[in-house]
Amino acid sequence: MRIGELSQRTGVPVATLKHYLREGLLPRGRATARTQAEYGEEHVHRLRLVQALTEVGGLTLAATRTVLDAVTTPGTSVTQALGVATEALPPRPAEDADLDLAPAQRALELAGWDTWPDSAPVRQLATAMRALEAAGLDASPELVAERARLLAPLVREEVAAVPDTSIADAATFAALGTVLYEPLLLALRRLGHQDASVRRFGHPGQRPT
């Protein structure tokens, strides 16, 4: 297909497609003439991945390129691709030399989780625990470990769904799943709070507990 048809198939404007080509987010098509190229289904798949990472995941183009490089580099493991995706995801923790990672690392140790000890998610966890403590709320490693243990069946179920057809398929699924499921889980958590509030305090339908 020509670039115009690729635009129609994906809903991405031609100008944006050309920008992606210049930035290396989209591989070049097969040249058919000096100024023309043919594009295939792999380009459609790649564009949908880019859209998911940027529009849903909120990644910058630079971060998107990092994730794309990880999921397309031969020899990349699923764990490595998932690590790259989680490192790239917003919100990025601010660089804070005074941030104490020990409470977060202790919580993960208590939960029995095997993670990179100084990764961006660990810094995010440490920052969140510090903010909770500053507000006078419980953010002890023991409490955080308890929450982690409650989440463990869910996240293990998600990882169990990663396909084993190829490393590329698995890595792409891992990266996309990380980006796309977090908004879903956040929305469900907030809706769960609404439901629990209705059950405890009443409204909107005065359901019995």
Image: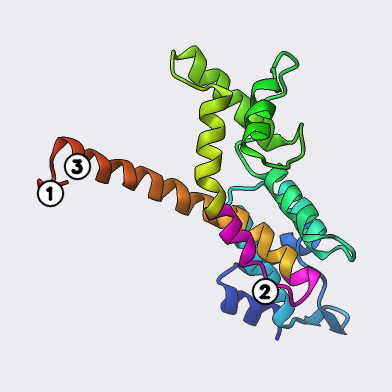
Residue placed at 62% from the left, 29% from the top? 107
Could you tell which of marks 3 and 1 lies nearer the N-terminus? 3
Disc number placed over residue 198 in the picture, else none: 3
- Asked if labels 1 and 3 touch by Cβ distance under 8 angstroms, the answer is yes
Q: CA distance from mark 2 to mark 3?
A: 43 Å
Q: Quadrant of residue 92?
A: top right
Nearer to the camera, 202 or 142 = 142
Q: Identify residue for label 1.
A: 207
Q: Which residues are magenta?
A: 154-169
| Magenta-colored segment: predominant secondary structure | helix
How many discs mark residues in the rendered view? 3
In the rendered view, tell whether residue 171 sits above or below residue 140.
below
Give amino acid for label 2: His
Q: Is residue 86 magenta?
A: no
Residue placed at 55% from the left, 71% from the top? 11
Q: CA distance from mark 3 to mark 1?
A: 7 Å
Q: Determine the secondary structure under disc 2.
A: helix
Image location of residue 194, percent across then percent down: 27, 42
In the rendered view, tell whether residue 45 sits above or below residue 70.
below
Could you tell which of marks 2 and 1 lies nearer the N-terminus? 2
In the rendered view, tell whether residue 119 sits above or below residue 101.
below
Q: Determine the secondary structure under disc 1.
A: loop
Q: Identify residue for label 2.
A: 45
- On the question of residue 168 being in view, the answer is yes
Nearer to the camera, 45 or 117 = 117
Disc 3 packing (10 Å; few <14; some 14–19; many ≥20): some
User: Left or right: 124 with respect to 96?
Assistant: left
Of tags 2 and 1, which is closer to the observer?
A: 1
Give amino acid for label 3: Val
- Asked if labels 3 and 2 touch by Cβ distance under 8 angstroms, the answer is no
Nearer to the camera, 39 or 178 = 178
